[in-house]
């Protein structure tokens, strides 16, 4: 491998060279959605960021196993099911499908493994029993709780002190807890709530134990990379790390990666401010690929200001890139199905290997788009685009419009005529073709994009 991948490891608080424990089986787990409602663009950012990381890993290593879970047992799910008078499976299946549809439109590939929490209850019970046996958990009034004082490394991931952790946990300090920071591994279920039989009575798992158990079953005790949003650092990831470390006497993950949050026009996106933007709403007015590009225009670890202007600029940028490909329609496509590091331009690959620097990689992509005069140069652009999850459409489809008033045959003829005229340096004929395109409603600034809403 000619380029060393470096990633910012939250556990170490610095960028580190990434070398997998087993180069023939790279493992990555990302916390997926809790499926009780429509998903917002912040969820979309996490999905897109780690989709790009997996694509980069697959360019560097022969076998990458990517797991992203579905949380399908949760108090919010229970509440919505009770409100609608249906089984929780009706709620979770509906919103799981919507999540997959929304993320698919953002170009996010499905994970290799998609474990559902409700399918892994036996593994959660087994891990909980192990923690009790090792003195790291205890039963109290039908609950099983993790004893945070039993783990000397508790707090090492988030870097919070004890007071901050107790305040940040935002959980009830119940009288049955030995310590205010102790968290639930198992809790009792009343007759009207979903539940499973366990050594501690009928109940359901706590949130944190779900991911630890699913990781252990599908990927192993210690994985290469664990990812998720920065809002999950504490308490979720801190608690995951603690219970897995104590159950297995081994670290849960060697690298911890977290993507930054989104601001909406300068303000933090939050329910309290009423500025939550749903992916399904954005997709009604903006192409999924433009949304994806917008999410990649900032470095994944930084807060991104997500605005209408950013989306509009992303659309223009994609027009430029697809325009370059359409200009080179006479050049045979040579994009590869499986892109490896050797198929990517050095500058582009180096940017992504520098802690997934997508802004710099996008700059390299535009440099590539300036010259697609040969099959090899066009292939370089297409292969680089594929690693970012961009430029996977046919340019003709990208520039298509549903407006029946546009004579597409005539537009194609004039585009070809203009290209020929420019190649022959017949600028008068090229200008005439441009004027004719303008008359048909095609933007003179970009002759390959109809200036109509699509």
Image: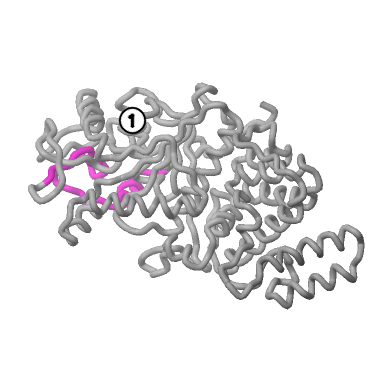
Tell me: residue 427, above or below residue 252: below
Residue at the spot 30% in from the left edge and 32% down from the top edge: 213
Give the residue number, with chain letter if any, for mark 1.
244
Q: Is residue 182 magenta?
A: yes
Residue 181 percent coordinates (x, y): 27, 43
Residue at the spot 51% in from the left edge and 35% down from the top edge: 12
Residue 312 percent coordinates (x, y): 60, 67
Tell me: residue 164, above or below residue 10: below
Residue at the spot 10% in from the left edge and 40% down from the top edge: 141
| Residue 103 visible from this viewpoint | yes
Residue 271 percent coordinates (x, y): 36, 65
Is residue 192 left or right of 366 when viewed as pictured?
left
Tell me: residue 142, above or below residue 285: above
Front-most of residues 129 and 86: 86
* Quarter of the figure that contains the N terminus: top right
* Quarter of the figure that contains the C terminus: bottom right
Front-most of residues 385 and 392: 392
Is residue 73 left or right of 107 when viewed as pictured?
left
Is residue 212 left or right of 440 when viewed as pictured?
left
Residue 420 percent coordinates (x, y): 84, 60
Residue at the spot 77% in from the left edge and 50% down from the top edge: 330
Front-most of residues 126 and 286: 286
Magenta residues, start to end: 160-189
How many numbered discs, if any?
1
| Residue 15 visible from this viewpoint | no
Identify the element where label 1 is drawn. helix
Query: Which residue reaches farthest left?
Result: 191
Rate crowding at label 1 as few (under 14), some (14 to 19) or many (20 or more) other CA atoms within 10 Å.
many
Tell me: residue 401, above or below residue 227: below
Is residue 193 left or right of 382 when viewed as pictured?
left
Quarter residue 98 falls in = bottom left
Q: Is residue 424 magenta?
A: no
């Amino acid at each position: 491998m000619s380029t060393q991948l470096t990633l910012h490891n939250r556990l170490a608080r610095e960028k580190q060279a990434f070398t997998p424990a087993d180069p023939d089986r790279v493992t990555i787990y990302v916390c997926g959605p809790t499926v009780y409602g429509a998903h917002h663009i912040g969820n979309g950012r996490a999905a897109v960021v780690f989709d790009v990381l997996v694509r980069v890993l697959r360019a560097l290593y022969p076998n990458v196993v990517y797991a992203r879970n579905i949380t399908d047992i949760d108090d919010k799910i229970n509440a919505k099911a009770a409100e609608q008078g249906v089984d929780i499976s009706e709620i979770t299946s509906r919103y799981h499908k919507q999540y997959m549809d929304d993320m698919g439109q953002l170009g996010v590939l499905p994970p290799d493994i998609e474990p559902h929490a409700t399918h892994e209850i036996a593994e959660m019970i087994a891990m909980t029993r192990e923690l009790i046996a090792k003195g790291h958990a205890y039963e109290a009034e039908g609950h099983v709780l993790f004893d945070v004082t039993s783990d000397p490394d508790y707090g090492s991931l988030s870097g919070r002190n004890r007071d901050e952790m107790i305040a940040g946990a935002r959980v009830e300090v119940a009288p049955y807890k030995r310590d205010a920071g102790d968290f639930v591994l198992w809790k009792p279920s009343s007759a009207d709530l979903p539940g499973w039989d366990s050594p501690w009575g009928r109940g359901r798992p706590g949130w944190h134990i779900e991911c630890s158990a699913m990781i252990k079953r599908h990927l192993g005790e210690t994985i290469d990379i664990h990812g998720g949003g920065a809002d999950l650092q504490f308490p979720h990831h801190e608690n995951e790390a603690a219970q897995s470390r104590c159950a297995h006497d081994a670290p849960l993950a060697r690298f911890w990666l977290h993507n930054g949050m989104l601001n909406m026009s300068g303000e933090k996106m939050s329910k309290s401010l009423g500025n939550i933007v749903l992916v399904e709403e954005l997709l009604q007015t903006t192409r999924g690929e433009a949304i994806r590009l917008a999410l990649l225009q900032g470095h994944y670890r930084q807060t991104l200001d997500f605005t209408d202007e950013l989306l509009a600029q992303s659309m223009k940028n994609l027009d430029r890139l697809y325009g370059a490909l359409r200009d080179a329609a006479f050049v045979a496509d040579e994009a590869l199905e499986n892109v490896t590091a050797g198929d990517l331009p050095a500058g582009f690959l180096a940017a992504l290997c520098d802690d997934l620097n997508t802004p710099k990689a996008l700059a390299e992509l535009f440099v590539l788009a300036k010259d697609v005069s040969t099959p090899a140069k066009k292939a370089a652009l297409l292969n680089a685009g594929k690693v970012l999850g961009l430029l996977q459409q046919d340019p003709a489809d990208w520039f298509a419009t549903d407006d029946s008033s546009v004579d597409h045959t005539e537009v194609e003829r004039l585009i070809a005529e203009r290209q020929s005229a420019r190649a022959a340096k017949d600028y008068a004929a090229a200008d005439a073709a441009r004027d004719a395109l303008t008359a048909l409603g095609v933007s003179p600034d970009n002759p390959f994009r109809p200036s109509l809403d699509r």
